[in-house]
């Protein structure tokens, strides 16, 4: 228990550990599902007119051009996803999962039928800026225990997912979330996804602005307006306040970057949001600076207008081209901004790049371990979650720690971990010890701190490989063999959808079926890319290897790390810069030297 703790701290830790033991002995936290509410009866509601009019007009324009609508567009016109709740509840009473386009419609409510990988639902939440209260976090744990597989995942949009939800329990989960002041509405399908922001917003000594009120305003703006659902495809918006942990806003369709604008450029000097557009790294593009700045309190209005331009002009015939990037490619930024201004009814202010001060740089390790807050005597503590997974027992323990030793908040990050904030100096050691008692840690190697993995083939039908298993195997293998003195980001994604954003990692792996003989048999594997980055070091990774078997991936990554350490220009050259400095053939030769 240690001798450095005060007597009352020792008693707290002893009680905490004893409580965990009692929970294990009792068989966990599972309880009987709550009784489902009776569903509404009667005929299905007629298709609404007003809120969906812009989308329907856009569909009609494509048809008038002789183009065939995508099946998802037809489904939205026949029965909008948000109107399917009554049928979804009837399916639950019948213990039936959706079929055909109903699989798509159910996603409007945040339920994803993930067969054939799992014959169950996944539920994805909406958590603006990734911040929950301890009691909400504990409530999600209860729902995962009662209706799911007894665990949850932190996602790469600072969000939570629950899995293994049976056909009977989907609506009970959704209604349980509402009871907690949470929602899953619009977290899937062709909608605006979870709103991300700086995970240390309001407590970060480096930040230029607290992103929480702006992310929350946009979150409620979306929820309150039916016409912002059923877009041509999904849409991502992020707010970055310039804090020590970046929000990866340049990978979003719209990124609002806090910047300081100098005097003498025709606008009031101070902190504004710079608008960047068109990020979609799975399609090998970062959001680009538009030259536009907006007052923070006007961000939701500007985002609303931009989304409505996308509703009008996004492709509704080719799902691969139905993202904002392709509208920008076709129109150019100036035309898109002019259409935005028409929606707004006022002109967007623009300033030259020289008017904007350099932004503070993020710290790639600030999401792990103990860091001082701007509030005197308080700290945030970053907790490592193995590829984002937590048991409900661990969730309840973390909620208790946030309540007892912190400020009651739990902050999720895009790096698939969480932060416990508001921890007084004299409780930090106790917090770390209690986290260890949960089977988690506040410390990580340079490899594991930047390890990101999507759901993979264990829970996603699109994935070609077990990403979380491969990520863990790479980390375990390399940690035992390679000592790193600089952080490394390894992103493991299961398919070209790039939920784990493999193109921005120092090392990225994208799932592939690897042929093993002439008969067409395949095994799990990956294509490996290197040299990605984000923020001021933004770059799209380039391919180094194709068709690496999953079993061989740890050795290949080890060889790459060894080649970097042996041949980098100096002790400060990052892995990304090292790999960009070498052509692929030369880099492969160096790796092969290290793996002989």
Image (cartoon, grey):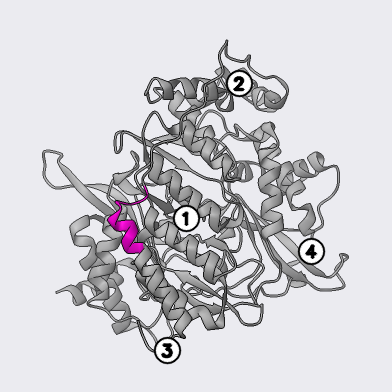
Mark 1 or 2: in front is: 1
Mark 3 or 4: in front is: 3
Viewer-closest of 59 and 217: 217
- Number of residues whose C-alpha sits closer than 10 Å to that of mark 3, classed few (under 14), some (14–19) or many (20 or more): few
Whole-percent x and y of residue 559? 24, 72
Is 228 placed left or right of 33 in the picture? right
Q: Identify residue for label 3.
A: 4
SS for callout 3: loop
- Number of residues whose C-alpha sits closer than 10 Å to that of mark 1, classed few (under 14), some (14–19) or many (20 or more): many
Start and end of the magenta stretch? 20-29
**Quadrant of the drawing holding the C terminus:** bottom left
User: Does residue 280 appear in the picture of this structure?
Assistant: yes
Mark with earlier residue (4, 2)? 2
Is 308 placed left or right of 451 in the picture? right
Q: Identify residue for label 1.
A: 156
Residue occupying the point 50% across, 79% down? 428
């Amino acid at each position: 228990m240690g001798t450095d703790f005060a007597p009352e701290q020792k008693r707290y830790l002893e009680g905490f550990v004893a409580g965990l033991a009692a929970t294990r002995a009792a068989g966990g936290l599972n309880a009987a599902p709550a009784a489902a509410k009776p569903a509404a009866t009667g005929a299905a509601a007629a298709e609404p007119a007003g809120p969906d009019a812009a989308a329907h007009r856009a569909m009609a324009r494509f048809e008038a051009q002789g183009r065939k609508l995508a099946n998802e567009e037809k489904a939205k016109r026949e029965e909008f996803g948000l109107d399917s709740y009554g049928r979804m509840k009837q399916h639950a009473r019948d213990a039936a999962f959706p079929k055909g386009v109903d699989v798509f419609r159910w996603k409007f409510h945040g339920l994803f039928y993930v067969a054939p990988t799992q014959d169950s639902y996944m539920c994805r939440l909406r958590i603006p800026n990734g911040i929950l209260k301890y009691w909400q976090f504990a409530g999600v744990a209860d729902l995962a225990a009662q209706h799911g597989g007894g665990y949850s995942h932190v996602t790469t949009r600072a969000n939570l997912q629950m899995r293994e939800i049976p056909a009977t329990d989907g609506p009970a989960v959704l209604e349980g979330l509402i009871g907690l002041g949470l929602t899953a509405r619009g977290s899937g399908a062709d909608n605006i996804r979870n709103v991300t922001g700086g995970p240390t917003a309001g407590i970060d000594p480096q930040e230029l602005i607290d992103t929480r009120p702006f992310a929350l305003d946009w979150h409620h703006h979306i929820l309150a307006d039916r016409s912002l659902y059923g877009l041509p495809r999904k849409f991502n918006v992020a707010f970055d306040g310039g804090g020590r942990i970046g929000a990866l806003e340049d990978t979003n369709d719209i990124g609002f970057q806090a910047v300081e604008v100098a005097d003498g450029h025709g606008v009031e000097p101070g902190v504004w949001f710079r608008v960047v557009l068109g990020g979609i790294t799975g399609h090998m593009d970062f959001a680009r600076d538009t030259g536009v700045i907006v007052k923070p309190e006007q961000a939701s209005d500007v985002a609303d207008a931009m989304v409505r331009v996308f509703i009008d002009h996004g492709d509704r015939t080719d799902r691969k081209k139905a993202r904002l990037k392709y509208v920008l490619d076709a129109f150019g930024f100036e035309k898109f901004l002019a259409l935005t201004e028409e929606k707004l009814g006022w002109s967007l202010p623009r300033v030259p790049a020289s008017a904007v001060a350099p932004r503070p740089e993020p710290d790639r390790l600030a999401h792990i371990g103990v860091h001082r807050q701007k509030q005197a005597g308080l700290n945030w503590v970053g907790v490592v979650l193995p590829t984002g997974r937590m048991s409900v027992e661990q969730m309840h323990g973390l909620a208790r720690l946030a309540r007892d030793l912190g400020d009651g908040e739990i902050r999720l990050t895009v790096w698939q971990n969480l932060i416990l904030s508001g921890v007084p100096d004299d409780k930090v050691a106790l917090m770390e010890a209690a986290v260890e008692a949960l089977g988690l840690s506040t410390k990580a190697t340079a490899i594991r701190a930047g390890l990101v993995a999507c759901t993979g083939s264990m829970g996603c039908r699109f994935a070609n490989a077990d990403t979380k298993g491969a990520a863990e195997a790479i980390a375990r293998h390399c940690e035992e063999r390679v000592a790193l003195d600089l952080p490394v980001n390894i992103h493991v994604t299961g398919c070209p959808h790039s939920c784990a954003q493999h193109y921005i990692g120092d090392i990225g792996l994208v799932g592939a079926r690897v042929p093993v003989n002439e008969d067409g048999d395949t095994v799990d594997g990956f294509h490996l890319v290197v040299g990605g980055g984000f923020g001021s070091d933004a770059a799209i990774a380039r391919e180094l290897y194709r068709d690496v078997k999953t079993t061989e991936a740890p050795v290949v990554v080890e060889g790459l790390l060894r080649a970097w350490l042996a041949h980098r220009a100096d002790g400060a050259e990052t892995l990304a810069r090292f790999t960009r400095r070498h052509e692929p053939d030369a880099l492969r030769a160096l790796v092969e030297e290290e793996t002989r």
